[in-house]
Amino acid sequence: MGLVTYVSFDGEKTTVDVANGDSLMQGAIDNGIDGILGDCGGGCACATCHCMVDEAWYAKTGEPDDMEADMLDGVLDPKPTSRLSCQVFMSDELDGIVVHLPESQF
Amino acid sequence: MSETTVIIGAGQAGGDLASALRQLKYEGRIVLIGEEPALPYRRPPLSKAYLSGEMTEQQLYIKPAATYEKQNVEVKTGVRVESIDRSAKTVTLGNGETIGYTKLAFCTGGHARRLPLPGAEKPNVHYVRTIEDIEKLKAQFQPGKRLLIIGGGYIGLEAAAVGIKKELKVTLVEALPRLLARVTGPELSEYYYGVHTAKGVDIKLGAGVEALEGGDTVETVVLADGTRLEADVIIVGIGLIPNTELAEAAGLEVDNGILVDLQCRSTTDPDIFAAGDCANHDHGFLQRRIRLESVPNASEGARVIAATICGKDAEHNGAPWFWSDQYDLKLQMVGINQGYEEVVIRGSMEEHNFSAFYLANGVVIAADTVSRPKDFMMAKKLVAGRVKSDAATLSDESVELKSLLG
Ligand SMILES: Cc1cc2nc3c(=O)[nH]c(=O)nc-3n(C[C@H](O)[C@H](O)[C@H](O)COP(=O)(O)OP(=O)(O)OC[C@H]3O[C@@H](n4cnc5c(N)ncnc54)[C@H](O)[C@@H]3O)c2cc1C
Ligand code: FES
């Protein structure tokens, strides 16, 4: 279990507990966080779970694999720390992570 | 009177609607009623990772029970809505309970079309729609068994891929002359025929099933041309029938789904909505009525209903899209290719890495991408933007699709 802070596009911060092994997408859905849709249920098929990892945390999440990187290429306004939140899994190391949510998932 | 939204059907659309209402700060009571015992769950893995045993039931749930509690959503599972009284604005459940509503949403999904033949009720004939279906199927899904799949749509093909992975002997029969005939062009049908055949699936096209023979179980499937196929386990994947009886009984207009407008509002009763597999809705992008069967469609419909109930403007207008996993191939499709005049292949079918673009009047109306997520993301934009292009450009890999967006 660790803390994740989701920062909405207009700056609202919500901090919630996410169990180790759960994706940050699931963490957002479970806590009713607006701004992450997760339409494909974590299959890396929809890119409606885009988030920008806070720069201080990006290195700890690791690099996206090819499939994810290709999906990210097509999201609205991708940033160097963009990730699909369904592909980032909670661990002790990520306890305290901050992610920023985009204006839109389309 | 205080507001109550009653949601019939605790599936993809129903669960999403409840959450979307709370995200929009809806303050009324929300009652989510589902016939199945489970909380709202994701169906796509039923024919993929759940059938193969790589996913647990818990992992199928869209959200845990605690989330509904926190969102103050009353979830009643394992109970059916039996009737609706539109003048009194109440629904009555199978357990006799009556609940009043100010807004009512049908998120009732559909049920697998049954094989209309004697013997289809025997215990080795399976359908693939619910957790319960898969639990029954899994018990018989053993290495070495002869699996016969009736129907060459997504569900049949995904089940075939899992069957091969689990070392069953897989035969698939399809009544039409090609696979995936309802949803894709002949090029993709042929491609998937090749893929499955190479993996060891014995595919018979143009093969209607005429009879099921056997004792306590079905042992032989007889085709229209007289061919007899022996089988231990049979999966029937021949389509879905929307669950509309309740809506019909309540006097709502139904025609291959509950008829609703761009806001997912019933054409008969402005306090009643429908989304997901059970809804035949006006579609802003396609500019016609359509009934779709996909998660994105159910989720979008749910979001549109929530916004409408909360007095916000929203329309069901996203370009439809879908995905399907077979073996290690990731198929992602966008748009509806109906009426296309030309299909353009980008990439290489031999290398299992390509996209098919469908053009009508020079406009990209749909695309099927195989293990090309980048093309898929761009195709979504090309289709949504009704971008014009041509075969020479789309097939030229040195031209970035992005550059076509202008
Ligand atoms: C095996 C399989 C694989 C799939 N794969 C994909 C895929 O890869 N990608 C994709 O996009 N889509 C896929 N789909 C389709 C997708 O799952 C459906 O389109 C989606 O679940 C539709 O959501 P829904 O809410 O309309 O219906 P459902 O999720 O079916 O929910 C409807 C619920 O309503 C309940 N209900 C009905 N009548 C009543 C009543 N009177 N009272 C109470 N409850 C009632 C039902 O029991 C059911 O639980 C797949 C479907 C299946 C079956
Ligand atoms: S949930 Fe679909 S890509 Fe992350």
Image (tube, coloured by chain):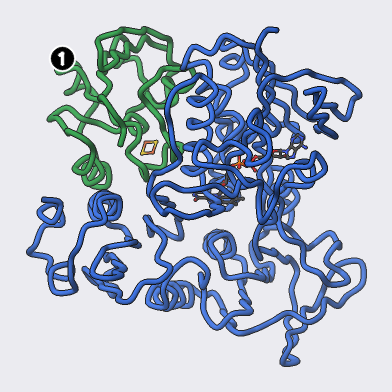
Q: Which chain wears green?
A: A
Of residues B33 and B214, the one nearer the viewer is: B33
Above or below, A71 against A8 in this view is below
Q: Residues within 10 Å of mark 1 (few under 14, many from 20)?
A: few
Q: Chain B is drawn in which colour?
A: blue
SS class, disc 1: helix
Measuring from the top left, give residue B247's x and y in whole percent: 75, 41
Q: Mark 1 points at which residue?
A: A56
Q: In this view, does B31 lie to the left or right of B367?
A: right
Taking the spot 52% from the left edge, 74% from the top edge, the residue there is: B179
In x, y percent, where is residue B364?
27, 63
Ligand 1 is found in which quarter of the picture? Answer: top right
Pinpoint residue B54: horizontal percent, then vertical percent: 53, 44
Write down the chain letter for disc 1. A
Q: What is the quadrant of residue B108 in the picture? A: top right
Q: Residue placed at 56% from the left, 12% from the top?
A: B71
